[in-house]
Image (tube, rainbow, N blue to C red):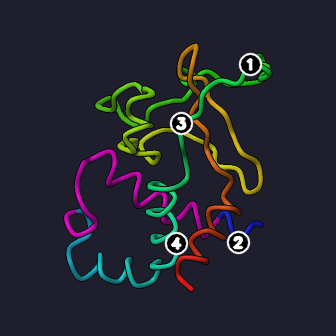
Amino acid sequence: MKYLLIAVIVPLSFLELIAQNSTTLDDIYGSESAKQVKDQYAEQLEFIEFYNENGYYLAEVPASKDLQEVKDIGEVEKLHDGLPDITSRMVESKILNVLGYNFRLNENKVQYYRLDENYLLVLRDVESVRKNLQEIAD
């Protein structure tokens, strides 16, 4: 578990810099250093990119769901001031950049965030997203 966190957190720190500065690894580190980072962390970067595209979805609030246990999306910190508030439209359109917000991804538990009265942002657990990526790669 400790190594999993390191494997995910180290590349996330690189991607956080990118998200904050709207730039690329090449711009930050120079093309040769960026290539080394990409080569060294290729698998982790692939997972992070895949999670950002496939790790979340929009769901209607079920009548039986106790919203007391669901976090409000407003409680999620933006990693820099230029990011918009998360809306159901962003989630539905798949334009949400998960990396720009301070979500604490869970290894084996789905997380729910209330967007409004009707919709939830659902963050898939890391384990199932990793399995999904592996199935696609095979």
Q: Distance between the residues labelled 2 and 4?
A: 12 Å
Q: Considering only order in the chain, which callout, 3 or 1, is on the residue closer to the N terminus?
A: 3
Q: Distance between the residues labelled 3 and 4?
A: 25 Å
Q: Considering only order in the chain, which callout, 3 or 2, is on the residue closer to the N terminus?
A: 2
Residue holding disc 3: 58
The image shows residue 120 at horizontal and vertical percentages of 59, 28
| Residue mark closest to the camera, 2 vs 4 | 4
| Residue mark closest to the camera, 4 vs 1 | 1
| Residue mark closest to the camera, 1 vs 3 | 1
The image shows residue 74 at horizontal and vertical percentages of 53, 20
Q: Are marks 2 and 1 in contact (CB under 8 Å)?
A: no
Label 4: how many Cα within 10 Å (few below 14, some 14–19, many 20+): some
| Residue mark closest to the camera, 2 vs 3 | 3
Label 2: how many Cα within 10 Å (few below 14, some 14–19, many 20+): few
Secondary structure state at the residue bearing disc 1:
loop
The image shows residue 136 at horizontal and vertical percentages of 54, 76
Q: Distance between the residues labelled 4 and 1?
A: 38 Å
Q: Classify residue 91 as left or right of residue 60.
A: left
Label 1: how many Cα within 10 Å (few below 14, some 14–19, many 20+): few
Residue holding disc 4: 44
Instruction: Judge whether 84 appears above or below 51 on screen.
Output: above
Please identify the dominant SS of the magenta region.
helix
Q: Considering only order in the chain, which callout, 1 or 2, is on the residue closer to the N terminus?
A: 2
Instruction: Judge whether 100 appears above or below 28 on screen.
Output: above
Task: Report the disc number at residue 63.
Answer: 1
* Residues drawn in magenta: 6-27
Task: Report the disc number at residue 3.
Answer: 2
Check the picture and name the quadrant holding the C terminus: bottom right
Q: How many labels does the image show?
A: 4
Q: How far apart are marks 1 and 3 (CA)?
A: 16 Å
